[in-house]
Image (cartoon, helix red, strand yellow):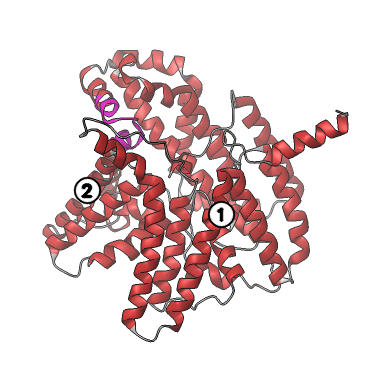
Amino acid sequence: MSAMAQQLSNLVELLKYNPEEPLLFTSGLFLFLFLGFTFFYGFMRRTVTLRIVYVTLFSLYFYYKTSGIFFLLLMFTATSDFLIGHFIARARTRRARRWLVALSVCVNLGMLGYFKYTNFLIEIFNNFLADPLEFRNIFLPIGISFFTFQSMSYIIDLYRGKVEPLRRWIDYLFYISFFPQLVAGPIVRARDFIPQIHQRPLIVSRAQFGEGFWLILCGLFKKAVISDFISLNFVDRIFDNPMLYTGLENLMGVLGYALQIYCDFSGYSDMAIGIALLLGFRFNANFDSPYKSATITEFWRRWHISLSSWLKDYLYISLGGNRKGRLRTYLNLMATMLLGGLWHGAAVRFIVWGGLHGAGLACHKWTMNRFLSFRPTGADMPRWRRVIGIAVTFGFVCVTWVFFRSPSMEVAGQVFSQIFTAFHPEIFFDFVTGYKWVVMLMALGYLLHFASARVEARTLQLVQRMPIVLYAVMMTGLIWLIMQLRNGDVQPFIYFQF
């Protein structure tokens, strides 16, 4: 085989789906593909239909590179709900529209349930059967939870009269498959995104470009520097075998995971929002410094905002919200968070995680009803109460993260056992010396997280005024830093498993 033929073969292999290497925003291949994509995209500012087709084809390829043949599942979801939405718009009776919404919910949740929960259910049945069932492990398509919830929001909002039905299937496929948020959110509402589809001309202002670049840079730093480094060099070791480490190390591992999951997920959201801005589309914020929350209610207004608001609008309110008495309100909160836990994964530990958050929200709601001095957010509190509230809320969230991160309930129990029975505070300075880079990055991560909103706004304004050449210098420097810290393969995003 000639050298040119070999190179062509290698390129074809690189562009094919590889289950061991899904396409990530932090990979060199994505940077290469995105640069090529944006070059041609720049010529389509005024050609709306061509732009929609072009972006949709790239988005489908992007999903193919993450989940292989399951890009057809994405197209099925888009086609199914586009047709159902069309029939809802033409239905003459409220009852017919309700049946069509129910059909959409059944299709979407049925598909989600099959891929996400079949293994879990069969495992439960096998625990009670003398002759266990043999089954093949079902592959979970990346991002299925996100695009099914996104598609359901369109159908429900259409039924509620909050959006107009789309007339073209390609427009709906564009909405569902838009690659920046496709595989790990944020969950983009139809009423927020659809009005942006037909921009003509599509304009990206200097300020918008600067904001998008800054979000991408911040997201890369959070994910590829802070999250990946503390995960590979410390947190994963703790949760792989907590009994090998003291309680102090386990506690630091929990604090490390709290930072890791925030930097990983908010880092992806930052990059998704930033890439969308560079393409002329604006998403709502998905994180708002959640560990600054002084109550658990405030935490869920700041953490994974697109999911928490989705659960509130389409599940909690549909169950009755707070309109049917206090007891029913508490039960609705519990049901919503238990289902939110199941959304994250089919395992007892996720149910426990969701149940704890549901109980926390219900308790906070009960406390506010009994004591008028308690407030929903820290902004309404005196400073001293806000500080205490932040500490208590952060501690509660970290306790629940133990169940979320542990591979089993047994491991979660071991983490707590070591913290409460084998703490050994005397090793603190040895720990800091042995894990100095981990400790430094954790300290930096929390320091940046708790920086004031005023500092963040001024930094963004400064970046927006910078000359373009400095953007290239900053990105080059960050890529160099990532390469220096990386000691293995590119780490997938945590929320790819959901």
SS at mark 2 in the image: helix
Residue 33 in picture, x, y percent from top left:
71, 46
Amino acid type, callout 1:
Leu
Classify mark 2: residues with Cα within 10 Å, few (<14), some (14-19) or many (20+): many
Left or right: 253 with respect to 22? left
Residue 439 in picture, x, y percent from top left:
45, 25
Q: Which residue is mark 2?
A: 360
Left or right: 366 with respect to 498? left
Quarter holding residue 370: bottom left
Looking at the image, residue 65 lies above or below residue 312: above
Looking at the image, residue 89 lies above or below residue 255: below
Looking at the image, residue 209 lies above or below residue 498: below
The secondary structure that dominates the magenta segment is: helix
Classify mark 1: residues with Cα within 10 Å, few (<14), some (14-19) or many (20+): some
Q: Which residue is mark 1?
A: 72
Left or right: 486 with respect to 130? right
- 424 and 36: which one is in front? 36
- 291 and 332: which one is in front? 332
Query: Magenta region: which residues?
Result: 399-413
Name which residue lies at 59% across and 23% down. 487
Residue 459 in picture, x, y percent from top left:
58, 49
Residue 267 in view of the camera: yes
N-terminal of the pair, mark 2 or mark 1, is: 1
Residue 473 in picture, x, y percent from top left:
73, 40
Residue 395 in view of the camera: no
Left or right: 56 with respect to 232? right
SS at mark 1 in the image: helix
Name which residue lies at 67% across and 55% down. 58
Name which residue lies at 31% across and 33% down. 402
Q: Residue furthest front?
A: 131
